[in-house]
Image (tube, helix red, strand yellow):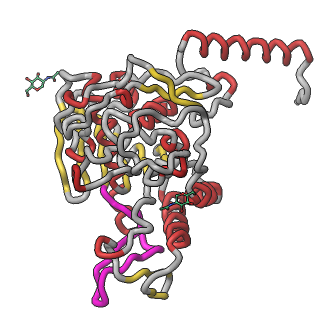
Amino acid sequence: MVTRLRPSLSFSSSCVVLLLVLVLVGAGKGEGYSGRVGGRCDLFSGYWVRDESYPLYEESTCQFVQHEFSCEKNGRPDRIYTHYRWQPLACNLLRFNGRDFLKKMMGKSIMFVGDSLSLNQWQSLTCMLHSSLPNSNYTLTRLGSVSIFTFTEYKVKVMVDRNVYLVDVVKEKIGRVLKLDSIESSKLWNGVDMLIFNTWHWWYRRGPTQPWDYIKVGNKVMKDMDRMKAFEVALTTWGKWVDANIDASKVQVFFQGISPSHYNGSLWGDPRAKGCLRQLTPVPGTKYPGGLPEAVAVLKSVLQKMKQPVTLLDITTLSLLRKDAHPSIYGLAGEMGMDCSHWCLAGVPDTWNEILYNLIL
Ligand SMILES: *[C@@H]1O[C@H](CO)[C@@H](O)[C@H](O)[C@H]1NC(C)=O
Ligand SMILES: *[C@@H]1O[C@H](CO)[C@@H](O)[C@H](O)[C@H]1NC(C)=O
């Protein structure tokens, strides 16, 4: 067998020209995810552009969107934040098409697993799909921690499993124990065709809303430990579960990535800002002045050590740029609260899902 290590010059240069042409055509006409051509487009590096053809849906078309994400219904007066599109640097995203998504997933199940940011992304996806096909019947049911949105004609189930740490919290005699190397609730994830995990926001929770009393690793029971380390141990437990239990030829596994908050205006050069309150526009450009949360590096290092391919939805930077897209006082607690962690719908999680759509097509 002859292996040609070096293709001829004319072959390689015509490839380059062809590539360039394809990329340029894609970028110029907005023909979609041209990144596949070179296999190099990083969908997560880019910037936000004003685009009046967004949002993908009106909040009012999805009555099932929960109060905490319904910023418009809760009185948010400005609407500019819904008219942005994510523009990757090296290619264009294909616009979301609900019918294509459901055809692709016909007969299959999707499950988001994680905290309320998973709920946020799940609600966004069900709303994107429903508003694409408003006449297609659906059912919405709940079984314990799992909510199931079924598009009956397509036999597609889009689910969310509320599970803030991925690893287990178990009631024992001494109290509630967060077990960093136990992942029994994974039972609910078997047999699902596409899994999208997330955990982060609860790891630094302290005081009366911390949902555990002790933390356990191996045989060691502690009152507390370094929280970032605990996050890393738990992620490693989750990674081992994926490696041992997922057949990559049948199941697609994603990690949602670290969804950022905006409580400190100094991080985007506006120290007088009251968190995300009355932020009307994104941070311009491709970089967030405050840098990335430390958890991103921890997550990436755990994913790198895994044997199974897990696709990271690396949504941190694109979301960091969106200081304008949180509920602030138009969320769960209204004027009494300041929610700069979740995202209004329509809004940023629609972009996470639009990227997911581009990755699975
Ligand atoms: C939706 O459900 C209604 C009531 O069950 C039924 O009459 C109708 O044919 C269904 N539509 C589709 C497109 O399946
Ligand atoms: C906000 O960020 C700045 C810049 O990193 C930091 O110096 C300051 O301590 C932060 N403030 C709070 C309340 O965390």
The part of the image, by quadrant, that contains residue 304 is: bottom right
Residue at 29% in and 25% down: 57
**Where the N terminus falls, by quadrant?**
top right
Q: Position of residue 342 (x, y in %)?
A: 35, 48
Q: Position of residue 88 (x, y in %)?
A: 58, 28
- Is residue 190 at least partly visible in the picture? no
The part of the image, by quadrant, that contains residue 59 is: top left
Q: Where 54 falls versus 319 (above or below)?
A: above
Q: Is residue 177 magenta?
A: yes
- Is residue 164 at least partly visible in the picture? yes
Along the line of sight, which residue is nearer the eye, 267 or 145? 267
Along the line of sight, which residue is nearer the eye, 211 or 180? 211
Along the line of sight, which residue is nearer the eye, 309 or 231? 231
Q: Position of residue 164 (x, y in %)?
A: 36, 62
Along the line of sight, which residue is nearer the eye, 263 or 253? 263
Q: Where 117 falls versus 239 (above or below)?
A: above
Q: Position of residue 316 (x, y in %)?
A: 52, 46
Residue at 51% in and 44% down: 320
Q: Is residue 161 magenta?
A: no
Give the magenta part as a residue range.
Answer: 162-183
Residue at 91% in and 26% down: 6
The part of the image, by quadrant, that contains residue 279 is: top left
Residue sitting farthest toward the front: 272
